[in-house]
Each structure stands twice: as structure tokens, then as C-alpha cells.
Image (cartoon, rainbow, N blue to C red):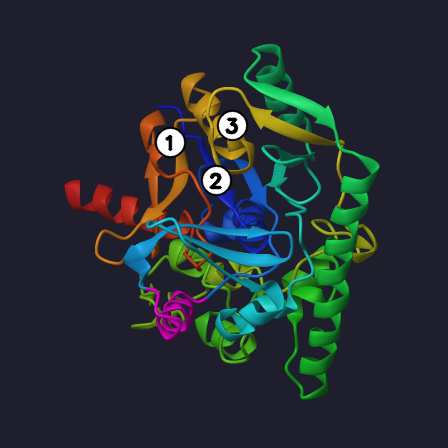
């Protein structure tokens, strides 16, 4: 029986977690993630505090048609046709503080990175990073499923400016945290040998002390997914362990994107490269779907499923009982990709939560 192949779409921290899970598969158990589509990300928002903020401005979640970030503003389009907007600088009240120690804006470890900054209206900026990603983009072009243009010098300059702004701002945040002895392990640029020496005896209690308790957890869900004893749970709050860790299990510590990251994954000078390491940068528009910012992510996922390059994809939909509250799930259906199109700006344990639930359901059937 062939191993299932999965495509994921995620923010930089989620992409890093997926990369670590597979790199250290002998410890974490690995995952079926085969293709990684990364998103440009400045920060993520707390659903609870975002809802509270909007309520204070007389807006209910069920009244909202679409969220967007455009030209330095956070935009809320309402079903009745009205629009509410605030400058990005004023989103601090509902921004997750744990995002403020990340210096990766363009998802450096993905196969393909996608975002709206730098590209013309109706297009997405696409950074091709790996041979696998290049092959997918080439096939989409050959099949006339996407339209590609060179990114303008003005677009490149804007993208570089924003990426460098995140690096500079969060480097200062890291320095500020470390002055009060809150270590940011993921920024330490260690060798593979040092990573293993520091991590080989660590379990959930160490993860809690080194990451969760000091405000470093990004709620990616990786620890919950790799836990051999199934004692780690994330239920709308920080990860918690309900029981004892399996002896000599270090999976959660290795998988977490906020513990040590070796220079084998991210070179020591990565923060001097605002776009990360890449093969090409393009402005891209999907010809197969009219979606937000060109529909590129949805177009890629639809193609991967249609050509059976992957068996399933991670998607983010909405919780049935809470409007605009993100909920991750795994699907092999193209129409689910179309239905899930559009950006959700609140935190969700992307994919890993869905994979965890899928694994648990499979065990129940046995």
C-alpha cells in the first residue's frame, strides 16, 4: 500500500513545524506532508480578541462577508455592503503576542510561497523555492491554468521593505524578551549536533517551560500530532498534557517550531535574506478560479488533486457554530478547495489538528 501524500498550506511557523516533523521522523513519527505551500505572514490574530474588538465597534461576526489586508489597512467587508477599516498598526489589540518573535515573512521552508504584497491587483506574488515547486508552477503554465508575469522592481522593493520590517521589529522583540531571561530558542542558529544534544532528553515538561510558559507557543498543533501517548491536547488554548509522557519520547520538543532550529534547515544568515532562498519570484493569476488575490493557492491545490500529485490537502474552513472561527480539515475533494477559498486571519492548528483527528477516527474503526 502506497503512503498517502498530503499538501499543506500554512504560515511560516506551521511550515517550519511540518519540516521539522519530517526531518526528525525517527523521533516524531513523521507525517504524510509532501508539498508545502507557504503564506506571507506578518502576524496572526486571536479569534477571541478580534471578536471582542469588532463587538466594541458594533460589528458581529455573522455580519462579515470578508476580511482583507490591503495597502496598510485591515479591512472588514460586511454583508450589507458597508466596510470597516483600521490601520494595521491598530491591530495590536488582537494580534497574538507569540507572533512577535518570528522573523520569517515569506515562509522560507515551503516549496512555493504565496502572498499579495508586491503583485498587481488580481495577482499573487509567488516565490518558487524548490525543484518540486518549480515543476508544479511549470506544469500549471504549460496547461494554461495560470498567467505569470515578472514582478516589477517596485513590487520587489515593497516586498523587501515589508519583509525587512518584520525582521527588524521582531529582532528587537527577541532582544527585549531575552533581556528578562526569556530565551527564544528558535533564533539560536545551532548545529545539528547541538540540536540533538539539547533536545534528546526533553519532553513535554521542557516544552512547557522553554516555549509555552514564556509566550512562544504558536498553536500550530505539531506537539499534539506527534505525541505517541496522545496526552497532549489543544482546545482553544495553549497545549496541555493530561497524563505522563512515554519514556524516552522527545517528539513534541523536536517538532515544535519554537525550539531549536538547526543551520541545516535555516542558515545562520537567513535574516539577511528577506525573501529567503529561492529559484524565482513571479506575479501569478489563476485562470481556473476567480479567488482572492488571483486564486493562486486554490488553483494550485485543485491541480494537485486533479492530477493525483497528492491524495489530500489541508484546508481551513469555518466552525459551523462560530462564524469566521477557523477550523482545519483534510479533504480530497476539489469542491472543498473552492468552498474554503479566502484568508482566515485567526489562529488555527492548521492541518496537524486535522491529521490528529483523522488518525484518531482511523483507530476507532479498527
Residue at horizontal 44%, vertical 60%? Answer: 223
Q: Which of the pair 64/24 is nearer the observer?
A: 64
In terms of sequence position, does the residue under pointer 1 or pointer 2 come before the other?
2
| Left or right: 137, with 364 as reference point | right
Q: Is residue 235 left or right of residue 255?
A: left
Q: Where residue 194 sits: x, y (%)?
A: 71, 63
- Spatial separation of the CA atoms under disc 3 and disc 2: 11 Å
Residue most toward the top? 143
**Secondary element at image label 1:** helix
Compared with 65, 331 (above or below) is above
Q: Which residues are magenta?
A: 46-59
Quadrant for the C terminus, please. top left
Looking at the rendered image, the disc whose residue lies closer to the viewer, 1 or 2, is: 1
Does residue 202 belong to the magenta stretch?
Answer: no
Q: Residues within 10 Å of mark 2 (few under 14, many from 20)?
A: many
Disc 1 versus disc 3: nearer the observer: 1
Q: Which residue is mark 1?
A: 338
- Mark 3 = which residue? 300
Amino acid at each position: 500500500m502506497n503512503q498517502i501524500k498530503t499538501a499543506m498550506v500554512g504560515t511560516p511557523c506551521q511550515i517550519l513545524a511540518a519540516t521539522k516533523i519530517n526531518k526528525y521522523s525517527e523521533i516524531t513519527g513523521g507525517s504524510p506532508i509532501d508539498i508545502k505551500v507557504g503564506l506571507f505572514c506578518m502576524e496572526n490574530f486571536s479569534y477571541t480578541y478580534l471578536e471582542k474588538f469588532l463587538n466594541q465597534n458594533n460589528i458581529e461576526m455573522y455580519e462579515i462577508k470578508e476580511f482583507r489586508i490591503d495597502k496598510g489597512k485591515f479591512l472588514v467587508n460586511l454583508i450589507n455592503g458597508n466596510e470597516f477599516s483600521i490601520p494595521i498598526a491598530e491591530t495590536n489589540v488582537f494580534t497574538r503576542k507569540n507572533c512577535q518573535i518570528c522573523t520569517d515573512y515569506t515562509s522560507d521552508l515551503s516549496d512555493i510561497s504565496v502572498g499579495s504584497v508586491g503583485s498587481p491587483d488580481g495577482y499573487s506574488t509567488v516565490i518558487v523555492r524548490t525543484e518540486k515547486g518549480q515543476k508544479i508552477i511549470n506544469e500549471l503554465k504549460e496547461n494554461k491554468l495560470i498567467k505569470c508575469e515578472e514582478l516589477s522592481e517596485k513590487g520587489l522593493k515593497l516586498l523587501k521593505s515589508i519583509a525587512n520590517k518584520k525582521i527588524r521589529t521582531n529582532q528587537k522583540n527577541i532582544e527585549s524578551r531575552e533581556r528578562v531571561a526569556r530565551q527564544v530558542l528558535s533564533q539560536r542558529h545551532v548545529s545539528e549536533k547541538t540540536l540533538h544534544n539539547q533536545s534528546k532528553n526533553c519532553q513535554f515538561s521542557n516544552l512547557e517551560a522553554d516555549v509555552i510558559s514564556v509566550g512562544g507557543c504558536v498553536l500550530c498543533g505539531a506537539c499534539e500530532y506527534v505525541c505517541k501517548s496522545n496526552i497532549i491536547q489543544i482546545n482553544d488554548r495553549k497545549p496541555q498534557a493530561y497524563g505522563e509522557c512515554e519514556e524516552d519520547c522527545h517528539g513534541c520538543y523536536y517538532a515544535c517550531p519554537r525550539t531549536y532550529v538547526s543551520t541545516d534547515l535555516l542558515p545562520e544568515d537567513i535574516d539577511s535574506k528577506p525573501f529567503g532562498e529561492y529559484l524565482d519570484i513571479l506575479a501569478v493569476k489563476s485562470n481556473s478560479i476567480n479567488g482572492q488575490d488571483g486564486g493562486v493557492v486554490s488553483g494550485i491545490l485543485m491541480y494537485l488533486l486533479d492530477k493525483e500529485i497528492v491524495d489530500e490537502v489541508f484546508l481551513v474552513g469555518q466552525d459551523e457554530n462560530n462564524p469566521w472561527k477557523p477550523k482545519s480539515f483534510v479533504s480530497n475533494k476539489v469542491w472543498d478547495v473552492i468552498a474554503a477559498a479566502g484568508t482566515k486571519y485567526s489562529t488555527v492548528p492548521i492541518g496537524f489538528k486535522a491529521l490528529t483527528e483523522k488518525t484518531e477516527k482511523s483507530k476507532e474503526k479498527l
